[in-house]
Amino acid sequence: MTSVASQPAPGAAAPGEAGEAFEELCRVMDRLRTGCPWDRVQTHETLKPYLLEETYEVLHAMDAGDVAAHREELGDLLFQVVFHARVASEQEDGFNAAEVCRGIRDKLVRRHPHVFGADAAREGMHPTTAAGVLNKWEQLKRAERGGASILSGVPPALPALLRAQRVGEKAARVGFDWKDAHQVIAKVREELAELEQAMAAGVADEVRHELGDLLFATVQLARLLQQSAEDALRLTIERFTRRFMFMEDALRSQGRTPEQCTMDELNALWDRAKAAERAAKA
């Protein structure tokens, strides 16, 4: 087995510290699985919502720039990994946490020959840019999977925006892509015109089809702009939520509700919410 020993990075855990902490977490999981009535009855299926929820809580902590929350939420997510491994270890054809660690460790070493391979130090033998590394990773992954489609590695269960972006990224790695963002903007306009035509025709299936094309093209625009469509939309939703709550609070202080307002009044409150955000940032 290839050695991966190296000097720890500044701030990294001391040698053996991370392994010891992980073992302690696994021991806690073992106690919970046998001693807690709730933990004892969980299955992979019942744990699915928590795995997804913890992932999004990590993203929320990152967006908020809250270092303590980021650390805590990563711990919650890691616990979900350990929990799933513990449940799997009880099955006849299952696996345990150590096998999970060894599996990802071996995959990372195998797919980074420019770092861990015998020729790692030889100039010109391996990619030297991030894009080159991604292309090499994709080649190695496809070879491991017997030449499967370059798109087969995109999980169908991903949120639609993220899946659309990953599909576009992978297609781009083999040259199937627009030259720049301006070309994608033209495509977005084209898809918008086709959606308007479908709306005029009043055919629901065609409207859904063209709306999907418009969303897909918009996601590819985000990709060409080197932005995450998923993150951009999530942050926009959070802004919308903050501003709408501002409107509700303002109306509540007047003893009114949004339903009692005209659209002009609501738009005026919306503008006040935006101005308040700008003032807070100044």
Image: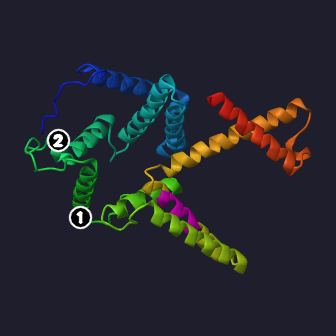
**Is disc 2 placed on a helix, strand or loop?**
helix
Circle 1/circle 2 CB separation < 8 Å: no
In the picture, the quarter occupied by the C terminus is top right
Q: Position of residue 97 (x, y in %)?
A: 33, 35
Is 127 situated above or below 21?
Answer: below
Question: Does 219 lie within the magenta span?
Answer: yes
Residue span colored magenta: 212-221
Are there few (<14), some (14-19), or many (20+) residues within 10 Å of tag 1? few
Q: Residue at x 40, y 34 (%)?
A: 82
Magenta stretch, main secondary structure class: helix
Q: Residue at x 91, y 45 (%)?
A: 260
Q: CA distance from mark 1 to mark 2?
A: 24 Å
**Is disc 1 placed on a helix, strand or loop?**
loop
Residue at the front extreme? 282
Question: Does 270 lie within the magenta span?
Answer: no
Of pointers 1 and 2, the one earlier in the residue sequence: 2
Which residue is disc 1 drawn over?
146
Mark number displayed over residue 115: 2
Of marks 1 and 2, the one in the foreground: 2
Q: Position of residue 257 (x, y in %)?
A: 88, 40
Is 218 situated above or below 261?
Answer: below
Q: Residue at x 57, y 68 (%)?
A: 189
Are there few (<14), some (14-19), or many (20+) residues within 10 Å of tag 2? some
Visible residue check, residue 232: yes
Visible residue check, residue 202: no
Kind of residue at disc 1? Gly
Q: In the image shown, does 137 or 194 lie closer to the viewer?
A: 194
